[in-house]
Image (tube, grey):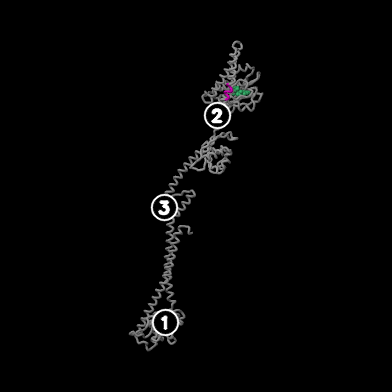
């Protein structure tokens, strides 16, 4: 209880009030007793003096003791006190309560002695006659300075005590009520003084728990109220600072959420403190699984941990690239020490360089493929030139043969250059499609017409397989014909004489699907997924002529139309190439 400031203020007040009340009570009790005793004593003495005066006016002792007795009884009734009249030798002349004959001489009683010597005597003592403590007051009966006798009045002490108690109770009641009022007032003062402090304490506690409450009410001008107002201002400033921080944090977290690069923050114990969604995907984890766990558990590859170590040891940025096993990913990791802002913490950035690496590989492949493809025709050209130089020119029929072969090689080179140019133009989007409504029948017929003589030369039959009604397609007819010619050309090239090639089309829900089927050498299953790549040739085809670019160009053209191209094949049985194009008639 004493921990509360309210009680700390109230308790000393209460103790003081109780102490003062106790002091006042004890003092006033003594004071009342004394005053009351003196008052009673003086009062009795005055009454005794009046009696003594009255007795001195008449002959004393009176001749008839009977008269004195009657007077004593009358005074008793008037004064409500025992009245005793004594002779100057101490014998009792009259007594309102006792027969004077049976009363003993009272000369030696202290109050009588005192009265004779000092003019007034009093004592509280036990009275065997009344069987209780009595207050006796005695004064002399004097005439011309000579003591004639003594008047003594007595009242029971219990009467004085009862009156005293009555008065004391009244005083105590007043003191008690005053003390109670003071206690209530002290509690009220403590309550009003501490109310703002308690409010402040509660608000501060809430603040430490993370809740900023509303402003506290403060209407006064005391220091505590000024403190409350200062606290309100502090809360206001804090709120606006927290809002600013929150908005900064939201921006930062939005950036981290949307970033395609993976981000992690690693603490001094090599534990992950922050991970963004991109890093979660790269390392196949989740924030719940990663945060608070060791970096090694999540990164798994020791090379990343080495990167972290060397960044920590040298205190500077470090980077390295790595293939992620089983994920076909090539990552660059950069470790950056966070320095003063977050001591012992390291920022890890992961950039997915897979596409860049793939492009680089493609570029290298392209260069090596093209040099490989150029080497054969260039080597034969060189050999033919040398043969001509070394004397073949002298033999005109041989020279003509060599020149024909040289022409074929140059044609092959020219075709390759043309196809490469074509492919690069298509890939870079420099070939705009001239889309128009085209009839499937006329496209197929036109392509077959162009290839018929070539097929006939090799005794190969070309058939069509076209349903009576086919929807039109929206396409660039020149390009679609180019694809069909490519496919028919390959079918002739990879078929033995006397075989049949079927060119046709059928409708699908939203497409028309074209096909070119042959009975040729077929494509090995391992090569089938790769034949649409640039320069790709199967082993059987290597010996023959061809650039390996035709299917790559075809695929690009079909994809530009929003269609697809694929092949099915069985070795030594034949191949069927399909491509789809969006039809005009969705039904
Ligand atoms: P190429 O100029 O070599 O024919 P393509 O891109 O047209 O280049 O074809 C790539 C490779 O696909 C060919 O070298 C060949 O190995 C294979 N190929 C294509 N069409 C057929 C087919 N109809 N039958 C068998 N193999 C084929």
Q: CA distance from mark 2 to mark 3?
A: 69 Å
Q: Which residue is mark 3?
A: 227
Tell me the quarter of the picture where residue 350 sits. top right
Of the image marks 2 and 1, the number of the one nearer the N terminus: 1
Position of the C terminus, as image quadrant, is top right
The vertical placement of 342 against 178, above or below, is above
Question: Tag on residue 441?
Answer: none
Where are the magenta residues, as a range? 368-374
Q: Residue at x 48, y 51 (%)?
A: 205
Of the image marks 2 and 3, the number of the one nearer the N terminus: 3
Question: Tag on residue 360?
Answer: 2
Q: Secondary structure at mark 3?
A: helix
Q: CA distance from mark 1 to mark 3?
A: 75 Å
Q: Secondary structure at mark 1?
A: helix
Q: Residues within 10 Å of mark 3 (few under 14, many from 20)?
A: some
Q: CA distance from mark 2 to mark 1?
A: 138 Å
Query: Residue 127 placed where, x, y %?
Result: 45, 81
Query: Residue 447 placed where, x, y %?
Result: 58, 20
Image-based side of 383 in relation to 250, left or right: right
Quarter of the rendered structure image containing ligand 1: top right
The vertical placement of 396 against 8, above or below, is above
Q: Which residue is mark 1?
A: 110
Q: Residue at x 55, y 29 (%)?
A: 360
Residue found farthest to the front: 314
Query: Residue 353 placed where, x, y %?
Result: 54, 33
Q: Residues within 10 Å of mark 2 (few under 14, many from 20)?
A: few
Q: Is residue 371 magenta?
A: yes
Q: Closer to us: mark 2 or mark 3?
A: 2
Image-based side of 58 in relation to 459, left or right: left
């Amino acid at each position: 209880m004493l921990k509360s400031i309210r009680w700390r203020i109230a308790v000393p007040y209460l103790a003081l009030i109780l102490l003062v009340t106790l002091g006042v009570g004890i003092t006033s009790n003594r004071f009342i007793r004394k005053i009351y005793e003196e008052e009673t004593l003086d009062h009795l003495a005055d009454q005794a003096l009046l009696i003594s005066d009255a007795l001195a006016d008449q002959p004393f002792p009176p001749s008839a003791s009977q008269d004195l007795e009657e007077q004593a009884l009358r005074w008793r009734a008037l004064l409500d006190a025992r009245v005793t009249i004594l002779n100057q030798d101490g014998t009792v002349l009259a007594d309102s309560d006792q027969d004077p004959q049976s009363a003993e001489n009272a000369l030696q009683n202290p109050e009588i002695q005192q009265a004779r010597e000092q003019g007034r005597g009093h004592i509280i003592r036990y009275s065997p006659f009344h069987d209780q403590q009595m207050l006796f007051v005695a004064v002399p009966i004097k005439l011309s300075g000579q003591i004639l006798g003594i008047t003594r009045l007595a009242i029971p002490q219990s009467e004085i005590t009862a009156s005293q108690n009555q008065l004391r109770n009244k005083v105590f009641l007043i003191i008690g009520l005053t003390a109670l009022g003071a206690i209530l007032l002290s509690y009220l003062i403590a309550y009003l003084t501490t109310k703002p402090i308690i409010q402040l304490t509660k608000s501060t506690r809430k603040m430490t728990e993370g809740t900023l409450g509303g402003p506290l009410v403060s209407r006064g001008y005391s220091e505590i109220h000024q403190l409350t107002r200062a606290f309100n201002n502090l809360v206001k400033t804090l709120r606006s600072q927290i809002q600013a921080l929150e908005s900064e944090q939201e921006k930062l977290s939005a950036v981290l959420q949307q970033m395609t690069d993976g981000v992690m923050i690693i603490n001094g114990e090599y534990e992950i403190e922050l991970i963004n969604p991109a890093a979660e995907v790269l390392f196949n984890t989740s924030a719940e699984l990663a945060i608070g766990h060791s970096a090694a558990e999540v990164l798994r590859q020791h090379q990343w941990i080495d990167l972290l170590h060397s960044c920590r040891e040298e205190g500077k940025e470090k980077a390295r690239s790595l293939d992620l096993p089983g994920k076909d990913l090539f990552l660059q990791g950069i470790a950056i020490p966070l320095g003063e802002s977050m001591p012992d913490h390291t920022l890890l950035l992961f950039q997915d360089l897979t596409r860049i690496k793939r492009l680089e590989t493609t570029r290298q492949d392209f260069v090596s493929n093209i040099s490989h493809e150029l080497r054969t025709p260039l080597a034969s050209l060189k050999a033919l030139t040398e043969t001509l130089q070394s004397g073949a020119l002298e033999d005109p029929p041989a020279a003509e043969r060599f020149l024909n072969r040289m022409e074929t090689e140059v044609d092959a080179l020219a075709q390759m250059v043309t196809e490469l140019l074509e492919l690069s133009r298509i890939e870079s989007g420099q070939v705009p499609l001239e889309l128009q409504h085209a009839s499937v029948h006329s496209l197929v017929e036109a392509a077959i017409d162009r290839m018929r003589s070539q097929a006939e030369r090799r005794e190969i039959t070309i058939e069509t397989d076209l349903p009576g009604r086919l929807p039109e397609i929206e396409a660039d007819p020149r390009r679609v014909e180019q694809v069909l010619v490519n496919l028919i050309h390959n079918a002739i090239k990879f078929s033995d004489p006397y075989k049949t090639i079927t060119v046709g089309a059928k409708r699908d829900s939203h497409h028309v699907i074209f096909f070119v089927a042959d009975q040729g050498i077929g494509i090995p299953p391992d090569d089938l997924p790769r034949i649409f790549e640039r320069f790709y040739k199967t082993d059987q085809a290597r010996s023959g002529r061809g650039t390996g670019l035709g299917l790559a160009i075809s695929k690009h053209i079909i994809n530009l139309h929003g269609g697809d191209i694929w092949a099915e094949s069985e070795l030594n049985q034949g191949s069927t190439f399909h491509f789809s194009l969006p039809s005009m008639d969705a039904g």
